[in-house]
Image (tube, rainbow, N blue to C red):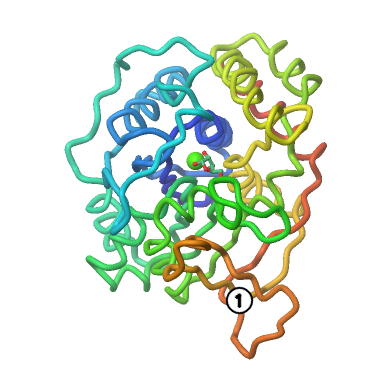
Amino acid sequence: MREKIIIDCDPGQDDAVALFLAMASSDELDILGITAVAGNVPLELTQRNARIICDIAGNKDMSVYAGCSRPMLLNLVTAENVHGMSGLDGIDIYEPVKKIDETHAVDFIIETLKASTDKSITLVPTGPLTNIAMAIIKEPSILNNIKQIVLMGGAMREGGNLSPSAEFNILVDPHAAHVVFDSGLPIIVMSLDVTHQVLTTKERVAKISKINNPAAQATAGMLQFFARYDSAKYGFDGAPLHDPCTIAWLLEPDLFQGKPCHVSIETGSNLTMGHTAVDFWGIGNTKPNVTWMHTIDADGFYTLLTERLRNFA
Ligand code: RIB
Ligand code: CA
């Protein structure tokens, strides 16, 4: 049975690779739609970038929906310093053939979930959680139709990447993150603790660059650009390839190790806003609300990604 998913993203080079990995895995994944949210770059660029990726993948049938243009309460903070002004620096940027769907992303998420008969749909957010939270707030009954949420966000061991104590996706919209983490839904969290283990080393990118199709070539170009910021910041060979970890878990969960934990989101302190307070050792008496992933087989991840990129024509 194929896994029905909705990918909610803010492309972003790593979001783009997650989209490629998902679209290259149609035997296992049934992508019901792609929704875009403001994050790495403003919404008009994230929704355009999602459509460019569909064009490059040759996916004429996929629908792309534009969602929320700013966080629920805070002002939007973007990351052009990491992703470039286009959000997809590393490839040629153009107005894609695919048009944006007229339905708002939040309404698409609600309508798709309400039309599903059972808990069969997985939400895969790889950007700030604004669209997901707004869908839950607008139509709480959808909680009965969501199988699970597999998200990229947060950090415990690795500290913050947008502030000393908070990861970008959570800090951009911490109030939305609180709504999602407090929803009672099964949540798989791919935090920086995992994504910092999957670095886009020169050797790994070189293998992808040898694959002769537009999606693999675009991936190599984007990752060569994407690596420069984090390599300089952390002294790594390459950058953490954050968002594809969500799709990889759906495809090969045995690549990962994690544990049930309770996670709270800081929404009161300016100093630690967006911090994911992970009760990793079960010290509090709070029931775990997520599965916190902490280990990944990095070579296995890149073998999966590289092999799937060969599936594109
Ligand atoms: O902190 C990394 C996350 O923030 C990734 O999803 C990246 O695309 C940005 O959205
Ligand atoms: Ca992202």
In the picture, the quarter occupied by the C terminus is: top right
Where on the picture, by quarter, is residue 115? bottom left
Residue 48 coordinates in the image, percent (x, y): 32, 26
Residue 297 coordinates in the image, percent (x, y): 81, 46
Residue 9 coordinates in the image, percent (x, y): 43, 41
Residue 299 coordinates in the image, percent (x, y): 82, 37
Q: How many marks are shown on the rendered structure? A: 1
> Crowdedness of circle 1 by 10 Å Cα count: few (<14), some, many (20+)?
many
Q: Under tag 1, what secondary structure?
A: strand
Q: Amino acid at mark 1?
A: His
Nearer the observer, 210 or 12 = 12
Nearer the observer, 273 or 170 = 273
Is 211 placed left or right of 9 in the picture?
right
Nearer the observer, 5 or 125 = 125
Where on the picture, by quarter, is residue 112? bottom left
Q: Residue at x 74, y 34 (%)?
A: 199
Compared with 198, 85 (above or below) is: above
Nearer the observer, 261 or 311 = 261
Q: Residue at x 43, y 68 (%)?
A: 267
Query: Which residue is denoted by mark 1 in the rendering?
Result: 262
Q: Residue at x 62, y 27 (%)?
A: 229
Is 53 placed left or right of 211 in the picture?
left
Is 272 placed left or right of 121 in the picture?
right
Compared with 44, 218 (above or below) is: above
